[in-house]
Image (tube, helix red, strand yellow):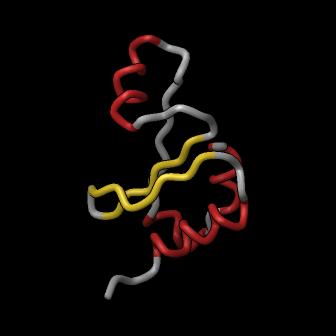
């Protein structure tokens, strides 16, 4: 998923987006999995200004791109 995101995020918006990952198989990452309620993979959580605005489960490229575009769009 990380490679996909790095490939599809337009160069002009890369400075506005951060991508973080964690390993759901490692016991030290299980707390964050519980906190985010990760039950299925892939799991994406979108944040704006430190607040969760959307989560997606599964790989639906058009929907992922829609959320990325919303995230980087200028706020109201």
Which quarter of the figure has residue 74? Answer: bottom left
Which residue is at the far bottom? 76
* Quarter of the image that includes the C terminus: bottom left
What is the tally of numbered marks visible in this picture? Answer: 0
Locate residue 22, reporting x and y percent: 49, 29
Looking at the picture, tell me which residue is in the foreground, 54 or 76: 54
Residue 63 in the image: above or below residue 60: below
Residue drawn 49% across the image and 14% down it: 26
Looking at the picture, tell me which residue is in the foreground, 32 or 4: 32
Looking at the picture, tell me which residue is in the foreground, 10 or 37: 37
Locate residue 27, reporting x and y percent: 44, 11
Which residue is at the far left? 50
Which quarter of the figure has residue 69? Answer: bottom right
Which residue is at the far top? 27
Residue drawn 52% across the image and 23% down it: 24
Residue 36 in the image: above or below residue 8: above
Looking at the picture, tell me which residue is in the foreground, 20 or 58: 58
Relative placement, left or right, of 3 versus 66 is right
Relative placement, left or right, of 18 versus 32 is right
Residue drawn 44% across the image and 59% down it: 54
Which quarter of the figure has residue 12? Answer: bottom right
* Quarter of the image that includes the N terminus: top right
Residue drawn 67% across the image and 46% down it: 58
Residue 19 in the image: above or below residue 22: below
């Amino acid at each position: 998923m990380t490679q996909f995101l790095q490939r599809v995020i337009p160069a002009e918006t890369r400075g506005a987006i951060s991508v973080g990952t964690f390993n759901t198989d490692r016991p030290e990452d299980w707390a964050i999995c519980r906190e985010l309620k990760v039950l299925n993979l892939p799991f994406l959580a979108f944040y704006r200004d430190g607040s969760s605005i959307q989560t997606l489960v599964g790989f639906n490229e058009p929907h992922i791109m829609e959320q990325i575009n919303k995230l980087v769009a200028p706020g109201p």
